[in-house]
Image: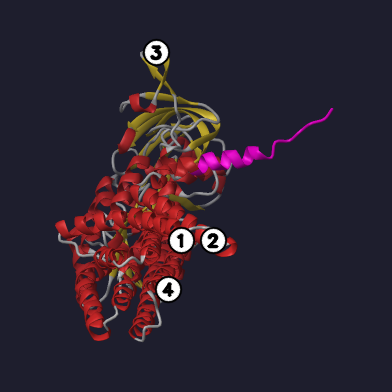
């Protein structure tokens, strides 16, 4: 049987994808005017070239096509210039408008057409960089499913995500995307949330865990109660905040805008002066063309937009362009401890049995007593027993001693466990060896629980907060980069010192109240340092707002921390912080490179114009071709890993 393969299928699919992704960009007025004038210019060039070969094409027709190209392209530039004048924004469009109008008036239609098309083409490339950065966010919006299954009043309904409300119960099966931010009420699933958090492997989710809109349930079935819907989801906030960040200009860009306002009249004065000196109007027009500041002004926004897009693609949210510049200058990073450098979750790290008690028995009895406890210590003991495959029986009776410990009857034995002060309050004197062991462990910054079985002290359980993954690598990367790292925490000094030692941080400030954290930040700032503060809690809000750059943990962070911060690490991956700082430094270097290159080309072009070497066409070519390396240099930032 003869089978014919249609090779055009993938090409058609790719074309449709391109049109979908860049629809707004392709339909923008600037794009349409650029393409139409560019096509007309191309036709005129080909028509003229064919006439030169055959000697039959009337020159007048070519001039009319050049004129059409010049008018189409220039009209958009003239409109932009007029709008700028009305708004008091004197930009590069003004001298270009004068140049093209003068060229058309003296009959240099081809020069006017080339100037207009090349200027528009430069703007088109700039818009393309911004569109490419936006495309990742548009892709996030398309991650929502078209229909979702919602259980209301005991009935399963198929609804659009737009019809969802907070509190809805969603049924999400294998292979389906999640349409809301919510909490799992039932079931387990492996969820691919790389689109939101940047995590490369699926995350195991179970009852009580949080899920995000736009993530994919790869395996399992879950019931999710919606806590955020629509634009209030993490997905919706990412789009809104990144859009705001791209629109807001950093201080460097505002300086260039102010410079451009002086630059425009300077270009006009130079053009008029050269006309008066040389008597050659074409030479004056060339000066207006090459002296346009568009390439210089282009240097900054393209780099900022590309770096913000880079952060969004890799699971970090930079809320404003100014944060990019400030991050590049940060020389001190202050970390909160609990929930930032650590998970804020206790972990059983050791069990110290006394006399003839086995370690497994000690953990087993303690886990049985704590089996139904919601206290972090109880959960940690039960989790440790499960991890070590120690059988945990149900207690026969259980009494919660609020704030101190628990007393239970299990396996025919009475088990009492709690902090040392529990036993002192009950009038029980602990042996000296036990007290010395407790004191030694406490000095290490660890929490100690005493376990008594049948009125005999049978052992100690040692707990500590779990260090966040990549915390050590993050601090090492910052230290290697010459950035000072500091811990400022409300926790006790011993615990802070232990975490500092584990991570490689040399300076700690412990037992700090929120206003004291602010004082530490200000002290560094007054000493001339640029400070980034990394935190997650409500008590970190003031420090996050005071620091030059506030960085919040997106998953573990509270709403106060996230709203106050300039940067949000959506996946709580601290390693993204050195990446952000490095990318920001590359962005500033890119801006400087762009400016040096643009000014160098400008000086060369001015000199060539004064000596009447450049014409309007060659001047336009030199000026606009110089914008291509600038834009390409900025676009590289999107791919920095």
Question: Mark 3 or mark 4, which is nearer the start of the sequence?
Answer: 3
Name the mark on residue 154: 3
Q: Pointers 2 and 4 in contact (CB under 8 A)? A: no
Instruction: Check residue 13 for magenta coloring.
Output: yes
Q: Are marks 3 and 2 in contact (CB under 8 Å)?
A: no
Under circle 4, the secondary element is helix
**Pair 4/3: label in front:** 4
Is residue 71 located in the magenta-colored stretch of the structure?
no
For the question of whether residue 157 can be seen, the reply is: yes
Q: Is residue 570 above or below residue 587?
A: above
The first of marks 1 and 2 along the sequence is 2
x, y (%) of residue 520? 22, 68
Marks 1 and 4 sit apart, C-alpha to C-alpha, by: 21 Å
- The answer to whether the residue labelled 1 contacts the one labelled 2, judged by CB atoms less than 8 Å apart, is yes
Q: Position of residue 416 (x, y in %)?
A: 40, 41
Range drawn in magenta: 1-18
Camera-side residue: 357 or 170? 170
- The colouring scheme, among rainbow, by chain, secondary structure or one colour, is secondary structure
Q: Residues within 10 Å of mark 2 (few under 14, many from 20)?
A: some
- Alpha-carbon span between mark 2 and mark 4: 22 Å
Few, some or many residues within 10 Å of mark 1 (<14, 14–19, 20+)? few
* Callout 3–callout 1 Cβ contact below 8 Å: no
> Callout 2: helix, strand or loop?
helix
What residue is pinned by disc 4?
A: 618
Answer whether labels 1 and 4 touch (C-beta < 8 Å).
no
Circle 4 packing at 10 Å, graded few (<14), some (14-19), many (20+), is: some
Residue at figure coordinates x 34%, y 24% from the top left: 163
Contact? badges 4 and 3 (CB < 8 Å): no
Residue labelled with disc 1: 59
Point out the tag, 1 or 4, that comes first from the N-terminus: 1
Q: Which mark is residue 51?
A: 2
Q: Residue at x 19, y 75 (%)?
A: 526
């Amino acid at each position: 049987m003869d089978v014919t393969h249609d090779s055009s299928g993938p090409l058609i699919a790719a074309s449709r994808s391109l049109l979908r992704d860049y629809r707004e960009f392709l339909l923008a007025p600037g794009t349409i005017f650029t393409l139409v004038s560019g096509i007309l210019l191309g036709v005129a060039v080909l028509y003229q070239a064919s006439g030169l070969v055959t000697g039959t094409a009337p020159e007048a027709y070519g001039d009319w096509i050049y004129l059409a190209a010049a008018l189409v392209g220039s009209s958009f530039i003239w409109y932009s210039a007029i709008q700028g004048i009305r708004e008091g924004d004197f930009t590069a469009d003004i001298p270009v408008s004068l140049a093209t109008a003068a060229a058309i008036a003296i009959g240099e239609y081809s020069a006017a057409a080339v100037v207009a098309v090349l200027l528009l083409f430069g703007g088109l490339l700039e818009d393309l960089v911004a569109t490419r950065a936006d495309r990742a966010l548009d892709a996030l919006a398309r991650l929502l499913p078209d229909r979702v299954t919602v259980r209301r009043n005991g009935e399963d309904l198929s609804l659009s995500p737009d019809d969802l409300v907070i509190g809805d119960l969603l049924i999400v099966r294998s292979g389906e995307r999640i349409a809301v931010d919510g909490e799992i009420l039932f079931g387990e699933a492996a969820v691919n949330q790389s689109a939101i958090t940047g995590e490369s492997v699926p995350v195991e989710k179970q009852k009580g865990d949080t899920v995000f809109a736009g993530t994919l349930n790869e395996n399992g079935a879950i019931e999710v109660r919606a806590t955020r819907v629509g634009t209030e989801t993490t997905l919706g906030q990412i789009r809104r905040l990144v859009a705001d960040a791209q629109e807001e200009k950093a201080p460097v860009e505002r300086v260039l805008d102010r410079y451009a306002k002086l630059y425009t009249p300077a270009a006009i004065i130079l053009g008029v002066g050269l006309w008066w000196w040389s008597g050659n109007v074409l030479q004056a027009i060339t000066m207006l063309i090459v002296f346009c500041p568009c390439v210089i002004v282009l240097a900054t926004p393209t780099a900022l937009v590309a770096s913000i897009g880079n952060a969004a693609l890799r699971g970090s949210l930079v809320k404003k362009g100014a944060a990019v510049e400030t991050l590049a200058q940060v020389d001190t990073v202050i970390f909160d401890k609990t929930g930032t450098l650590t998970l804020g979750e206790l972990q059983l790290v050791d069990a110290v049995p006394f006399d003839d008690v086995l370690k497994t028995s000690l953990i087993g009895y303690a886990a049985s007593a704590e089996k139904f406890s919601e206290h972090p210590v109880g959960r940690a003991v039960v989790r440790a027993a499960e991890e070590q495959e120690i059988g945990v029986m149900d207690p026969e009776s259980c009494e919660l001693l609020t704030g101190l410990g628990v007393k239970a009857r299990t396996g025919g034995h009475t088990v009492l466990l709690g902090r040392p002060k529990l036993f002192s309050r009950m009038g029980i004197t602990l042996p000296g060896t036990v007290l010395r062991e407790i004191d030694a462990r406490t000095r290490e910054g660890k929490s100690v629980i005493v376990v008594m079985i049948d009125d005999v002290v049978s052992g100690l359980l040692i707990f500590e907060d779990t260090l966040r993954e990549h915390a050590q690598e993050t601090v090492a990367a910052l230290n290697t980069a010459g950035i000072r790292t500091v811990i400022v925490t409300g926790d006790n000094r011993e615990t802070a010192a232990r975490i500092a030692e584990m991570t490689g941080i040399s300076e700690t400030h412990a037992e700090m109240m929120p206003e004291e954290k602010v004082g530490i930040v200000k002290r560094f700032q007054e000493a001339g340092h640029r400070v980034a503060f990394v935190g997650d809690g409500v008590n970190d809000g003031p420090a996050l707002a005071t620091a030059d750059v506030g960085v919040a943990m997106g998953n573990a962070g509270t709403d106060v921390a996230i709203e106050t911060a300039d940067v949000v690490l959506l996946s709580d991956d601290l390693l993204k912080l050195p990446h952000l700082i490095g990318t920001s430094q590359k962005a500033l270097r890119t801006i400087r490179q762009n400016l040096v290159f643009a000014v160098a080309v400008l000086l060369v072009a001015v000199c060539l114009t004064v000596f009447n070497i450049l014409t309007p066409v060659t001047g336009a070519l030199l000026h606009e071709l110089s914008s291509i390396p600038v834009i390409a240099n900025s676009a590289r930032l999107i791919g920095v890993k």
